[in-house]
């Protein structure tokens, strides 16, 4: 029996929320996380550039012998996921469909809000996915361009965050939504502040758990001999970034409350691919990774 290897990527640290859900769902899997922090944010980049970045990252992760890839980035999922699924012969799971299922399940009235990057909103991906599940649903989408840079600076509370959230939430609340889906994996880090703005009656939907379950189903359907159950000595996850490893590790500690240990740096080689520049052995333990800290 071989333990599943799962590659996960995002433009930055937001996808760590999905990695945590993945670890809870398949505690024996070996997780390999890549944060493309040198090129974030993706929210306003041209679609063809997003597709190129995705192709590079997926190719790199396949070089790490992963059994599946999680696109823990709503922008990438909205703009280029179907193309990538057609190009690569491994399960590639994105955020949009799972987020739509979770949002529809949480809504009583069918009035659903989506907060996301500008690219995700422009794509209309959430509106289409929700409409396919609940025809007649009223979907109100709101681009929140300032939130990802704030979170990547470690700003997850304070008056600046609350002021931005009040501005972004106002159109959704005015439309009478009863649920809001986090259409960006960074946004769950602001959950307490969002709750303070929208009040107790609006459901806040994080697609991460549904994504993790979808990945587990896809991996085991493809190869039932793989396992995601715990080992006696679990393989620690690997963390890689195209940016500064120290910054990535600091944000992981700040936002999730656990220490990723040493982080490997990945850079662009002269052919446009990704290559490990610094291959350091991780010092973290799986137990430390999987423990839920305060955000």
Image: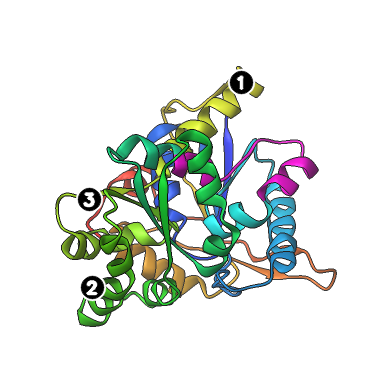
| Image side of residue 51 versus residue 1, left or right | right
| The label number, if any, that marks residue 157 in the structure image | 2
* Nearest to the observer: residue 153 or residue 210: 210
**Overall secondary structure of the magenta stretch?**
helix
The residue stretch that appears in magenta: 81-100
What residue does disc 3 label? 202
What residue does disc 1 label? 221
Q: Quadrant of the C terminus?
A: bottom left
What's the CA distance linking mark 3 and mark 2?
20 Å
Dot 1 alpha-carbon crowd within 10 angstroms: few under 14, some 14 to 19, many 20 or more: few
Image marks 1 and 3: residues in contact by CB distance under 8 Å:
no
What's the CA distance linking mark 1 and mark 2?
41 Å
Q: Quadrant of the N terminus?
A: top right
Q: Residue at x 54, y 71 (%)?
A: 37
Question: Where does residue 5 sit, x and y in percent of width and height?
Answer: 59, 37
Q: Residue at x 45, y 47 (%)?
A: 19
In the rendered structure, does residue 91 fall within the stretch colored magenta? yes
Dot 2 alpha-carbon crowd within 10 angstroms: few under 14, some 14 to 19, many 20 or more: some
């Amino acid at each position: 029996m071989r333990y599943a290897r799962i590659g996960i990527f995002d433009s930055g640290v937001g996808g760590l929320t999905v990695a945590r859900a993945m670890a809870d769902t398949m505690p024996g899997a070996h997780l390999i996380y890549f944060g493309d922090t040198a090129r974030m944010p993706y929210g306003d980049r041209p679609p063809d550039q997003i597709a190129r970045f995705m192709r590079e990252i997926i190719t790199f992760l396949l070089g790490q012998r992963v059994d599946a890839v999680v696109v823990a980035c709503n922008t990438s999922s909205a703009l280029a996921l179907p193309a990538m699924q057609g190009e690569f012969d491994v399960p590639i799971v994105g955020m949009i469909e799972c987020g739509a299922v979770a949002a529809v399940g949480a809504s009583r009235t069918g009035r659903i809000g989506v907060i996301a990057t500008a690219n995700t909103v422009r794509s209309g991906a959430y509106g289409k996915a929700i409409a396919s599940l609940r025809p007649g649903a009223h979907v109100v989408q709101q681009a929140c361009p300032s939130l990802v840079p704030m979170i990547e600076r470690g700003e997850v509370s304070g008056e600046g965050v609350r002021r931005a959230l009040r501005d972004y939430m106002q159109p959704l609340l005015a439309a009478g939504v009863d649920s809001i889906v986090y259409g960006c994996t960074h946004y769950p880090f602001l959950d307490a502040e969002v709750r303070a703005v929208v009040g107790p009656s609006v459901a806040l939907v994080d697609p991460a758990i549904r994504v993790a379950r979808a990945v587990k189903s896809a991996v085991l359907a493809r190869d039932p001999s793989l396992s995601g159950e715990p080992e006696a000595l679990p393989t620690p996850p690997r963390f890689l970034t195209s940016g500064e490893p120290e910054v990535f590790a600091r944000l992981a500690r700040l936002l999730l409350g656990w220490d990723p240990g040493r982080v490997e740096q990945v850079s662009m080689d002269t052919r446009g691919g990704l290559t490990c520049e610094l291959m350091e052995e991780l010092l973290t333990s799986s137990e430390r990774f999987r423990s839920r800290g305060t955000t």
